[in-house]
Image (cartoon, grey):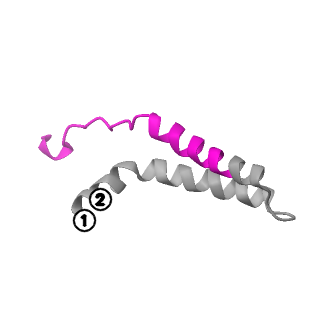
Amino acid sequence: MQKMITWIKAHNKAIVGFLVAGVTMYLQLKDHGLTQDEWWEIIFSAIAGGGIVFAVPNITQKKTPDDSNKV
C-alpha cells in the first residue's frame, strides 16, 4: 500500500493531466450521445494529456541558505 501511495505522490501531476484532458474532451463531445469514434478521441486525448505531463520532468527548487544563521 505504501508503494502505491508513493507512486501516486510522484505522478499526481500526470494523473491530473490525464483526467483533465479526458473529462474536457468528454464534455465537449457529449451533446447527442457518443459514437465509438468519439470514445476513441476521449481515450487518446486523455492518454496524450497524461503522457505529455508525465514526460516533463519536475523542476526541483533550489535550496536557499537559512537566513537564521546570519548575524
Tag 1–tag 2 contact (CB < 8 Å)? yes
| Magenta-tinted stretch | 42-71
Label 2 CA crowd tier, 10 Å (few <14, some 14–19, many 20+) = few
26 left or right of 64? right
Number of marks: 2
| Disc 1 secondary structure class | loop
The verdict on residue 50 being magenta is: yes
**Residue at the extreme right of the image, as rendered:** 32
The verdict on residue 61 being magenta is: yes
**Residue at the extreme front of the image, as rendered:** 36
**Which residue is identified by label 1?**
1
| Position above or below: 9 against 59 | below
The x, y position of residue 48, in whole percent, is 59, 41
23 left or right of 70? right
Which numbered dot is residue 4? 2
Identified at 29% across, 59% down, the residue is: 4
Between residue 70 and residue 20, name the one nearer to us.
Answer: 20
Quadrant assignment for the C terminus? top left
Quadrant assignment for the N terminus? bottom left
| Position above or below: 42 against 27 | above
Between residue 21 and residue 33, name the one nearer to us.
Answer: 33
